[in-house]
Image (tube, rainbow, N blue to C red):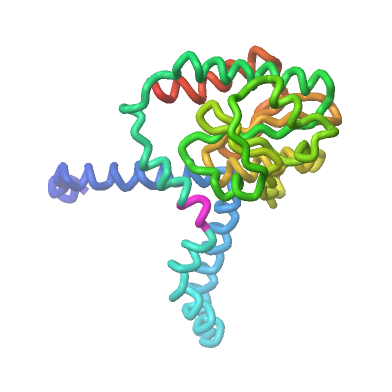
Amino acid sequence: MLEIIRHIRWQDALDILIVAFIIYRLLLIIKGTRAVQMLMGLGILLVVLLLSDFLKLHTLYWIIQSFWAQVVLALIILFQPEIRKALAHMGETPFLQPLASASELKSFDEIVRATISLANRKIGALIVIERDISLNDFVEIGTPLEARVTKEILLSIFHPTSPIHDGAVIIREERIIAAGCFLPITLRTDINRALGTRHRAALAITEETDAVVIIVSEETGTVSVAFDGKLEGPMDMGSLRDFLTEVFTEKKRR
C-alpha cells in the first residue's frame, strides 16, 4: 500500500478531485428529477447484461448488448433537458454580473404585491421569471406582450374574465413578454397528489430550466415558489420578497 502511495503524483490527485467534482455537480443537477429514475433503469440493464454474460444467456445478452451500443445516443435523447440545464450552468459568468439595479428590485416588489393581492382574492396564477436559460419555446406558445411589470397589469391578466388567465405569465428582465403560456406537466410520482396542474407545471419548467415560478392556488389562496425542481411554501409577502432577492441578487454577488 505504501509503495502505491509513493507512486501517486500530484497530477493524479488533482485529476481525481476534478472528476469527483464533475460527478458531484452532475448529481446535484439531476437530483429530484426524472433523470434519477432513468439512470437507475440503465443501471439495472447493465446488471442484467453482466449476469446474462456470466450465466451464458446468449439471446438476452445479444439483445441488451445491441441496445447498449446505442446507449450514448439514448442518453442524449432522454437527458436533453438536464444536459441543456448543465451546459447553461457551465456558461454562467457570475464574476461579470452586476448587482441588482433599483429597477430590478422595483420589479420584484411589483410581482410580490400582485402575488399577495391575487392570493387574498383566491385568484389562481402562474408567474414564471426567466433567469439564464431562455424560455422562448414557451413564449412562442402564448400571447406575446411587451409590458413593464406592474401589479395592475398582472392582476388584469389573471382576472377570471381575462381570455389568457389560465396560462402562465413569463417575465424577462423586468418585462412581461408573454401571457397565456402553456407549460409541460411533470410526470414525477414523488410529489403530493393533492397538488394541482399549476404546481405540476411549475415543477416541470424548473426541472428543465433555471427559472423561478410563483404559484397562487385558487382553491386555498396559498403562495408557493418552484425552483430547481423543488417546491417552497407557503409564503407570505416578506418570505416571497426575501426568496426572490436571494435568488436574483445574492447569486450575482458571488
Q: Is residue 195 visible?
A: no
Is-magenta flag for residue 68? no
Image location of residue 193, percent across then percent down: 79, 43
Examine the image and state in which quarter residue 152 appears.
Answer: top right
- Determine the residue positioned at 52% across, 38% down: 210
Examine the image and state in which quarter residue 217 appears.
Answer: top right
The residue closer to the viewer here, 135 or 199, is 135
Q: Is residue 62 left or right of residue 213?
A: left
Q: Which residues are magenta?
A: 79-83
Q: Is residue 171 left or right of residue 12?
A: right
Examine the image and state in which quarter residue 149 appears.
Answer: top right
Image location of residue 107, percent across then percent down: 57, 20
Q: How many marks?
A: 0
- Determine the residue positioned at 67% across, 43% down: 143
Q: Is residue 101 left or right of residue 226?
A: left
Q: Is residue 125 visible?
A: yes
Is 66 located above or below residue 145 in the figure? below
Image location of residue 183, percent across then percent down: 67, 46
